[in-house]
Amino acid sequence: MGPSAEYRAESAAGPASAGDVAADGGQAVAVPPVIALNGIGKSFPGVRALDRVSFDVRAGEVHALLGENGAGKSTLIKIISGVHRPDEGELAVDGRTVWFDNPQEAQRAGIATIYQELLLFPDLSVAENIFLGHPPRGRLKGIDWRAMRQQARDLLGSLAIHDLDVEATVGSLSVGNRQRVEIAKALSQNARVLIMDEPTAALTEHDVERLFSIVRMLRERGVAIIYISHRLEEVFLLADRVTVLRDGGHVATKPVSETGHVALISMMVGRRIDAMFPKLPATLGDPVLEVRNLRRPPVTNGVSLTVRAGEIVGLAGLVGSGRSELAQAIFGITPAEGGEILIDGKTTAIKSPGRAKALGIAYVPEDRGTQGLVRPMSLAQNVSMAVLNRLFRGAFINGRTEAALAERSVDQFSIRTSGVDQIVSKLSGGNQQKVVLGKWLAAQPKLLIMDEPTRGIDVGAKSEIHRLMSELAQQGLAILMISSELPEVLGMSDRILVMREGRIVAGFARDAASQEAIAAAMMAGSSKGEPADAPLPMAVGATP
Amino acid sequence: MAETNMGPATRSAATGRRRFQFGHEALLLVLLVVSLSVLATQSDVFLTTANLLNQGRLMTEVAIVALPMTMIIVTGGIDLSVGSMLGLSAIVLGYSWQNLGLPLGVACVVAVLTGTAAGFFNGLLVTRTKVPPLIATLATLALFRGLAEGISEARSVRGYPDWFFRLGQGEVLGVPSQLWILLVAIVIAWIVLARTTFGRSLYAIGHNEVAARFSGIAVDRCKLAIYTASGFASGLAGLIFVSRVSTTRSDMGTGLELDVIAAVVLGGTSIFGGVGTIVGTVLGFVLIQLLKNGLALTGVTSDATIVVIGTVLIGSILLTNFIGRRHRGDG
């Protein structure tokens, strides 16, 4: 089959109305935008990824790109950066129509992309990474190492980064610093357009602020920035204009000053979301999970907590505070070395995930790609994976039973897929997360442990998952939710526990909790800290 | 069976994958038919029932061991020690019958149990010590062979009673006895891998062991089971081998692992795990055996035969990758 068989540029260019909208949105400028997309369309088998989308970005502007997962953001940036070729429409740089055959050509045109997963070489130094592929040459075409280091220092200095050793290996840097290296690398190639895909997803608050100041600095210098994020606050803090995509189509492009949170969310999901976290009241039953002084040093150092039927307990804490490790100790992946776990009031020894599963515990892990799903396998095969032995008692797999189970999950969670035979890796992040949920709810657990249940998924899917959690709690499921998003913790939890250094250091009832109080407990004395914050855990245990 | 349908590829990736699998098996079948017809024109003996049945007899040991090997490779593992386990079982058979004076029937059971225990040991090594299977079974390859040589003290055992040869040299309903055993083994292995929750677990482990573990699949128990099965199959193959050649020597089964792995890989099982079928493996060992025999009958030297088999192996993998890329490529 030949490449791009259905090339229909002519027929599409005319009636594209989206282009007009884009022109209305901003003020008329004489200088053409650095990048302009006109009526871009792209299809993959079974999916219309982009449908005649128009989009532009001007020099010295931050243009935010919003949309749920699967809305077409990734496809759009891949077309701009030369990874994909559009089926229809045209792409112009500085007003001239161009045609990128590969990412290198886009790079030569001054377009740099910083992906979520940073593409650096951990064993090479900062300077080597920045100048990889285009090092300063000395005589005899050899690499001029001294010039390279100096230029790297200058480049970082121009971004007001003075605390980074250009000779350090990238592997030893924090995520925030690696990202700065990536930005410096883009600038070393004279990027005029910088595409940033969820740059703050893995950053700490402090790093986010530094990133913002760098982005603002670049904007001052006239770099055009395409900024993709799920966090609306960032859009309002940073962006000049915002474009919303939905289901591959262009919804609107507006100056940020002319829009608001509610308007953007309703544009993204196509309907209004009244409450982001529809937590419904649920009656609490008996304790389902009781953990007493659980230990697995050095990450779990004596944790006690209780989760009741119908209750959602939020577990807050900084990255590395031992929350996931606690969950994995309860689930038997790394069995506890001391302490007690009681399920329904009975002491149990949980030495393997299989045992935990038999006791009615389900665990939706933090990393759905490596822990939650077998991505090369089909949706149906993933959904049945935790219930194989229950679903097929005679050990023989019945394809029809399996498909029926998967169909139920697809319906219940409105998973967007071409069918239950779809390979899971082809689904969007939000839909993949729904598959993980479907897989564990098929096991009909009594206790559901959710580790970052909505990380990296779009607003619509997030809201659906929250609603679902709420409904499940109403039906009597006990839920232990680990989350790094404080609004989520506050919005969803009946009770909030805060972990630090492998211990629970504070507990709050829903009404008594505030972002400030939780954040304070998360960080208090995080340097060394006295081991026994005695009074606080007591308060936790007492909270019914 | 038809060739893969190369029509409009608009269906889901899952069917694409299934077709890709089917594509490899269809390819092997075509190869099989082609080599059969070419070789048949070169020799009068080749395409006779007697010859083909005899080839089946010669193939059985490799074939029986290749079945659990398919499962092991599907999980992303490998078992290099199968030849040594075969040798060890053979020696234990001869030793316990001749030197320990056990009845031959009991000695047979002890021999197969020895192989099974050796496989179990491999399984423990792989699951408990987290040593990569390649290294672990490379070590036991040497270990078991050393044991076999130590026990036998380089003496061979002969003089088995006639009834014992029925297994390796006799016939049932006009077909070599061991082919019936192989047939049963194939059916069992096919059902286990393709139709049971256990087989599904093996694929899941091969694709993503962490996710399989996080799904509550007893990963270690699954692995222990297949390495043990590999030992059992090697022990059984040892028994058949001794019965076929009427004698026991400590170097029996040397190099068996290469023939077995070649058959499995030729059958389309991915050495990276997650992909492979018993049907593919069956086609793999049949094709290799027929090529060996056909070429020998045609007067090709055994060195040249190995070259041909190597070429077929590489060619089939390249071709399958090409087809696979075509399928993915239009996606």
Image: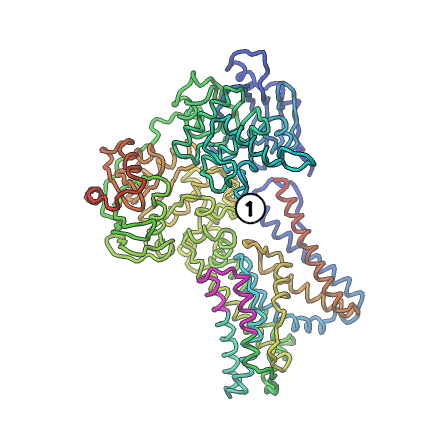
Residue A291 locus on image (x, y percent): 26, 50
Left or right for A181, reference A389: right
Residue A408 visible, this angle: no
Q: Callout 1, which amino acid?
A: Ala
Note whether B254 is above or below B161 in the view shown.
Answer: above
Left or right for B52, reference A28: right
- Is residue B254 covered in magenta? no
- Is residue B123 covered in magenta? yes
Task: Name the image quarter holding the N terminus of chain A.
Answer: top right
Residue A461 locus on image (x, y percent): 42, 34
Q: Looking at the image, which is closer to me, A214 or A409?
A: A214
Note whether B96 is above or below A212 in the view shown.
Answer: below
> To which quarter of the image does residue A524 belong?
top left
Task: Name the image quarter holding the C terminus of chain A.
Answer: top left
Instruction: Kindly identify which chain the residue marked by label 1 belongs to.
Output: B
Residue under label 1? B14
Circle 1: element type: helix
Residue B308 locus on image (x, y percent): 74, 62
Residue B325 visible, this angle: yes
Residue A414 locus on image (x, y percent): 43, 37
Q: Looking at the image, which is closer to me, B113 or A195?
A: A195
Count residues near mark 1 (Cα–Cα under 10 Å), then give few for <14, some for 14-19, many for 20+. some
Q: Looking at the image, which is closer to me, A467 or A306?
A: A306
Residue appearing at x 43%, y 16% in the figure: A258
Left or right for A524, reference A382: left
Look at the image and give the residue range highlighted in magenta. B119-145
Q: Looking at the image, which is closer to me, A260 or B181?
A: A260
